[in-house]
């Protein structure tokens, strides 16, 4: 580029070798275009990275939305998610209803019952259990070496007590076998029949061996036989019930032995 002084005392800034234009010959005018292809009078395109001035006629921006902290509850609890809490509360009734339906379905399925229908019914089983308990108490009083009335009452008390421990054994066996106690009163009456059969054998006076070993064996045999006839369940359920009931019986007997070891008032220590 050369600098030629003009007649006005300035300099003529003209390129030494102007670039030819492709459309100069086609148009026939021969007038060169502005470099970059911009038409005369048009606004120049902004270059990359160069900020463009905002036109004066452009509307100004305005934010009409409320503030970020407007309506903020300062006492809000951030330790629990309200949506999660609502979901849990809404799911809780469904869970309870599903559990209730499962229990109803189990009670409606005879294969899940603990007490099977049929012989004997509630009235017959209760009357039989009562008669066996009284018979065992009478035998205990007749075969007692001393204090027959007190021994008879004590055996009757033990009979009633172990009907209760038998129901605990039924509950334990039902839970372990996923069965439902559909008729608890009938189950208690049938347990009473089995316990009465045991104490009739236990109240006998067999003198083959010293002690109560033979009577205990006869009582256990009567208990197991009646248990099989009363409940008619698989061996697992009846086995769990019998073992649990026998364990409770042993615990109670240990308590009676410990009580006998306590000296009475006024006796020599």
Image (spheres, rainbow, N blue to C red):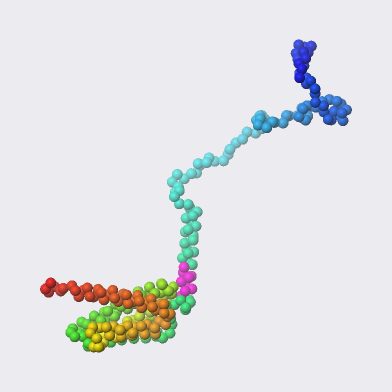
Vertical arrangement, residue 173 with respect to residue 137, above or below: above
Vertical arrangement, residue 29 with respect to residue 138, above or below: above
Closest to the observer, 23 or 137: 23
Vertical arrangement, residue 175 with respect to residue 52, above or below: below
Q: Is residue 269 left or right of residue 81?
A: left
Pick the quarter of the image with the N terminus. Answer: top right
Q: Position of residue 98 (x, y in %)?
A: 49, 67
Whether 26 is among the magenta residues is: no
Q: Quadrant of residue 30?
A: top right
Pick the quarter of the image with the C terminus. Answer: bottom left
Whether 105 is among the magenta residues is: yes
Secondary structure that dominates the magenta span: helix
- Find the residue positioned furthest to the front: 209
Vertical arrangement, residue 102 with respect to residue 47, above or below: below
Residue shown at the point (24%, 86%) measured from the top left: 209
Instruction: Report how many numbered discs are placed on residues in the image.
Output: 0
* Any part of residue 4 in sight: yes
Residue shown at the point (43%, 74%) measured from the top left: 177
Residue shown at the point (39%, 79%) measured from the top left: 238
Residue shown at the point (87%, 28%) measured from the top left: 25
Q: Position of residue 213 (x, y in %)?
A: 27, 83
* Any part of residue 57 in sight: no
Closest to the observer, 221 or 265: 221
Closest to the observer, 88 or 45: 45
Q: Is residue 68 left or right of residue 143?
A: right
Q: Quadrant of residue 32?
A: top right
Q: Position of residue 2 (x, y in %)?
A: 76, 17
Q: Is residue 256 left or right of residue 82?
A: left
Closest to the observer, 209 or 82: 209
Q: Quadrant of residue 233?
A: bottom left
Q: Which residues are magenta?
A: 99-107
């Amino acid at each position: 580029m050369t600098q030629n002084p003009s007649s006005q005392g300035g300099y003529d800034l003209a390129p030494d070798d102007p670039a030819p234009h492709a459309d100069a010959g086609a148009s026939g005018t021969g007038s060169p275009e502005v470099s970059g292809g911009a038409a005369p009078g048009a606004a120049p395109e902004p270059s990359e990275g160069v900020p463009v001035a905002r036109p004066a006629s452009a509307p100004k921006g305005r934010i009409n939305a409320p503030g970020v902290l407007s309506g903020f509850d300062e006492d809000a609890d951030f330790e629990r998610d309200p949506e999660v809490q609502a979901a849990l509360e809404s799911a809780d009734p469904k869970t309870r209803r599903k559990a209730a339906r499962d229990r109803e379905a189990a009670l409606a399925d005879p294969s899940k019952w603990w007490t099977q229908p049929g012989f004997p019914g509630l009235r017959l089983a209760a009357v039989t259990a009562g008669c066996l308990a009284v018979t065992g108490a009478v035998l205990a009083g007749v075969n007692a070496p001393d204090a027959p009335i007190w021994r008879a009452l004590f055996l009757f008390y033990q009979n009633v007590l172990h009907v209760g421990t038998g129901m605990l054994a039924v509950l334990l066996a039902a839970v372990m076998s996923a069965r439902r106690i559909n008729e608890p009163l009938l189950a208690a009456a049938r347990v009473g029949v089995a316990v009465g059969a045991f104490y009739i054998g236990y109240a006998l006076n067999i003198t083959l061996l010293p002690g109560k070993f033979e009577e205990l064996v006869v009582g256990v045999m009567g208990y197991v036989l009646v248990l099989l006839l009363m409940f008619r369940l698989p061996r697992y359920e009846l086995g769990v019930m019998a073992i649990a009931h026998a364990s409770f019986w042993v615990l109670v007997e240990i308590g009676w032995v410990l009580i006998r070891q306590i000296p009475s008032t006024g006796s020599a220590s």
